[in-house]
Image: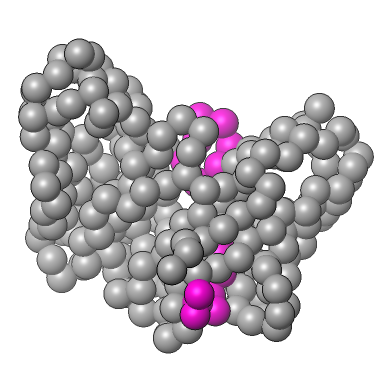
Amino acid sequence: KQEVTQIPAALSVPEGENLVLNCSFTDSAIYNLQWFRQDPGKGLTSLLLIQSSQREQTSGRLNASLDKSSGRSTLYIAASQPGDSATYLCAVRDSNYQLIWGAGTKLIIKP
Amino acid sequence: NAGVMQNPRHLVRRRGQEARLRCSPMKGHSHVYWYRQLPEEGLKFMVYLQKENIIDESGMPKERFSAEFPKEGPSILRIQQVVRGDSAAYFCASSPPSRATSTDTQYFGPGTRLTVL
């Protein structure tokens, strides 16, 4: 049974720092991995999707990597800003269509 | 092109009442997925539907919960005789009508936040 873990559960850093969020999964037989952003009381915004055949994806200040063999993904945020404060969720798509989710990392960027 | 729409955004029910959550997929999408997010937890898959068919309801509680996606109109997630433990955010996602391949992204709605008093 696939399990997704995100570490740390919460993170608070000063504005301007580069930071890394971690996601690990137990079963390497995935189709893709996706990072989402969730603002308090709001919906989900898809940030990056990495197919199982890919190693990384980049969008602006965000870079996500995928290492299937070790069951890990990282989300790198460069030059963090207060507007980046949110909960970041990692989800893997299994052999069918279900998304299996981590519990998220709550990120606070201090001005 | 409107995104996935869910209504209501917030729903308050007393224990024992029924809750009906609606999801209108993106235009042209015929696959709908429902997920539940309990407080301080990640999302959990509930059910996957195509038009007039339930494909996978393995994540649905055995009792009180049902889902449908009729030929016309939105998908409905129905919770009968709600209890406090049903309080959660319920998210709907949709994807295109092609075969649900690994390249198909699920597009999420804003969610319905259900509070059971």
Answer whether residue A3 is visible to the viewer in this image. no
Q: Quadrant of the N terminus of chain A?
A: bottom left
Q: Residue furthest front?
A: B1
- Say which of A87 and A103 sits in front: A87
Residue at (14%, 19%) from the top-left corner? A15
Residue at (43%, 68%) from the top-left corner? B1
Q: Residue furthest bottom?
A: B98
Left or right: B100, with A27 as reference point: right
Left or right: A15, with B106 as reference point: left
Answer whether residue B105 is visible to the viewer in this image. yes
Q: Quadrant of the C terminus of chain A?
A: top left
Query: At which x and y percent is residue B32?
Result: 56, 69
- Say which of A75 and B5 sits in front: B5
B96 versus B15 height, above or below: below
A77 versus B35 height, above or below: above
Query: At which x and y percent is residue B10?
Result: 67, 39
Residue at (36%, 48%) from the top-left corner? A45
Left or right: B48, with A8 as reference point: right
Residue at (9%, 23%) from the top-left corner? A17
Left or right: B23, with A63 as reference point: right
Query: At which x and y percent is residue B14?
Result: 86, 33
* Image: magenta residue range: B27-45
> Image quarter for residue A86?
top left
- Say which of B71 and B82 sits in front: B71
Q: Is residue A30 magenta?
A: no
Numbered marks: total: 0
Q: Is residue B43 magenta?
A: yes
